[in-house]
């Protein structure tokens, strides 16, 4: 343990990434426990589905450019090719703008249809699932995500993590506490949507200022039109972005489908809220490794281009050592304090203690593939897509069957099974694709 602590202290970047992810986790728990204390488990479960669905919709709008931007912009930035950087950035802005305009038009048409159905007394406007009323936030969320990715491509790892994982929960917590304790108003779903809209607007302004500062420092200008852009280069960007879209959507569906299965299959409505609380507590076990392995993201493409596999192996070993050590410690703490953590959400939540422990074990084993997934994404994104589709399919089939017969514990075991198999498959595929050992010794 002493060696691990010394290793972490000597690697300041890793320590900072973990500290940020830990802060993000506590803020997420804080915000969610506030919400769960003021609404019943049924409403809290619907609230959780809404937030996770919003992320999926936002990634769909970005068309994979948030990942392709890290791949290409980091490569251009690292090589000092600011012309290529500028061309990709302009192309990226055009893609996001076009997607947002199309979405807004569809959104307006969709809501006009709902209003018409209400006026014709066919279906009440307030009778839909909560997530329907949050769709308008998707373009704002998408802009926040792509701007954070641009910051990551320019080696601003800590800034990326702050905006990607921390800023929203900080602002929402401040808004909620102000409403409850200073203004003495009650918390309701539509009030939280207004808070989220305000938070996203503030984040967009802050990210814009930071990006413009970095671009100005490197003499990079955004132009309204992309000049002298090779058609082959544009097609390559579009092809990779399309592949990344599928990978990201499937990946995000993996982290929401289990909650939806509990909603649709399990007879007890309160169990959706209990499972949502389990997800919040367990998210540190995949959130921390993802944060730590984000250190890899802007460095993978340059090393692969140089075919410097020894340097990549060394970097992978360092990241995995810290990631596994920290995840193991976090898993132990969650298991020991599982009942206390669940009780923070409400007096009835501790009945999900055993399912929580099984779920967290699945997250721990599944997160062992985080580094491998980041590297394989830049080598063969289609392979990542196939692996994620396989995991999603296995999760759906086993989840429906086990949840129907065993409830929350069944859903947790389906996550454990699918996550473990995915980690094993990912390691074998990476080893076959590159001359490196996914876990250092295998």
Image (cartoon, helix red, strand yellow):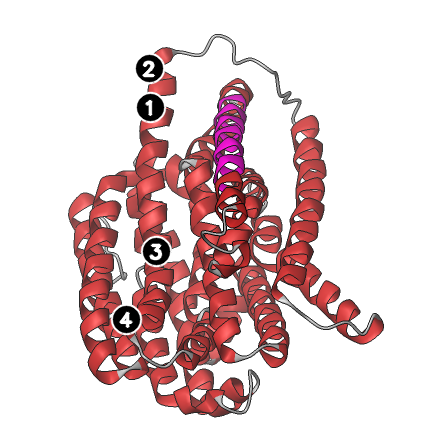
Q: Residues within 10 Å of mark 4 (few under 14, many from 20)?
A: many
State the residue in front, 325 or 279.
279
Residue 40 seen from this side = yes
From the top left corner, tell me how far across and down residue 5 is, in percent: 51, 74
What's the residue at 45%, 32% (across, down)? 75
From the top left corner, tell me how far across and down residue 347 is, in percent: 54, 91
Q: Which residue is mark 4?
A: 415
From the top left corner, tell me how far across and down residue 300 is, in percent: 38, 42
State how far apart marks 1 and 2 are (Cα): 6 Å
The stretch in magenta equals 90-110
Residue 253 circle label: 3
Q: Which mark is in front, 3 or 2?
A: 3
State how far apart marks 4 and 3 are (Cα): 13 Å
Residue 112 vertical position relative to residue 158 in the rendered view, above or below: above
Q: Which residue is mark 2?
A: 232
From the top left corner, tell me how far across and down residue 440 is, in percent: 27, 61
Residue situated furthest front in the rendering: 120
């Amino acid at each position: 343990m002493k060696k691990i602590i010394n290793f972490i202290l000597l690697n300041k970047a890793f320590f900072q990434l973990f500290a940020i992810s830990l802060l993000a986790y506590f803020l997420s728990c804080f915000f969610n426990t506030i919400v769960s204390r003021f609404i019943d488990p049924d409403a809290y479960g619907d609230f959780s589905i809404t937030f996770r669905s919003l992320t999926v919709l936002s990634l769909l709008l970005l068309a994979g450019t948030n990942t392709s931007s890290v791949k290409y912009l980091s490569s251009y930035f690292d090589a000092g090719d600011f012309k290529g950087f500028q061309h990709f950035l302009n192309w990226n802005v055009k893609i996001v703008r076009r997607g947002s305009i199309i979405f807004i038009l569809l959104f307006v048409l969709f809501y006009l249809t709902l209003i018409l159905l209400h006026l014709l007394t066919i279906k009440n406007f307030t009778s839909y699932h909560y997530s329907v009323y949050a769709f308008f936030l998707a373009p704002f969320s998408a802009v926040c995500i792509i701007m954070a990715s641009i910051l990551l491509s320019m080696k601003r790892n800590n800034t990326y993590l702050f905006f990607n994982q921390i800023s929203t929960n900080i602002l929402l917590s401040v808004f909620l506490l102000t409403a409850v304790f200073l203004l003495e108003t009650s918390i309701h779903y539509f009030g939280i949507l207004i808070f989220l809209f305000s938070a996203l607007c503030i984040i967009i302004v802050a990210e814009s200022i930071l990006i413009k500062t970095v671009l100005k420092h490197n003499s990079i200008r955004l132009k309204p039109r992309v000049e002298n852009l090779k058609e082959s280069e544009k097609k390559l960007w579009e092809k990779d972005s399309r592949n990344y879209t599928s990978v990201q959507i499937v990946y995000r569906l993996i982290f929401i489908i289990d909650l939806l299965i509990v909603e649709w299959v399990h007879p007890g409505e309160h169990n959706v809220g209990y499972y949502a609380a389990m997800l919040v507590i367990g998210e540190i076990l995949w959130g921390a490794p993802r944060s730590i392995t984000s250190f890899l993201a802007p460095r993978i493409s340059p090393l692969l281009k140089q075919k410097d596999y020894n340097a990549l192996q060394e970097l992978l070993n360092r990241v995995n050592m810290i990631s596994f050590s920290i995840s193991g410690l976090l898993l132990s703490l969650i298991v020991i304090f599982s009942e206390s953590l669940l009780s923070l959400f409400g007096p009835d939540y501790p009945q999900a203690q055993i399912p929580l422990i099984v779920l967290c074990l699945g997250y721990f084993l599944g997160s062992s593939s985080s580094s491998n997934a980041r590297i394989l994404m830049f080598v063969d994104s289609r392979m990542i897509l196939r692996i994620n589709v396989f995991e999603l399919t296995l999760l759906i089939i086993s989840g429906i069957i086990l949840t129907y017969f065993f409830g929350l514990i069944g859903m947790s075991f389906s996550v454990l099974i699918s996550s473990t198999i995915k980690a094993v498959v990912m390691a074998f595929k990476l080893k076959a694709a590159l001359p490196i050992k996914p876990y250092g010794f295998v």
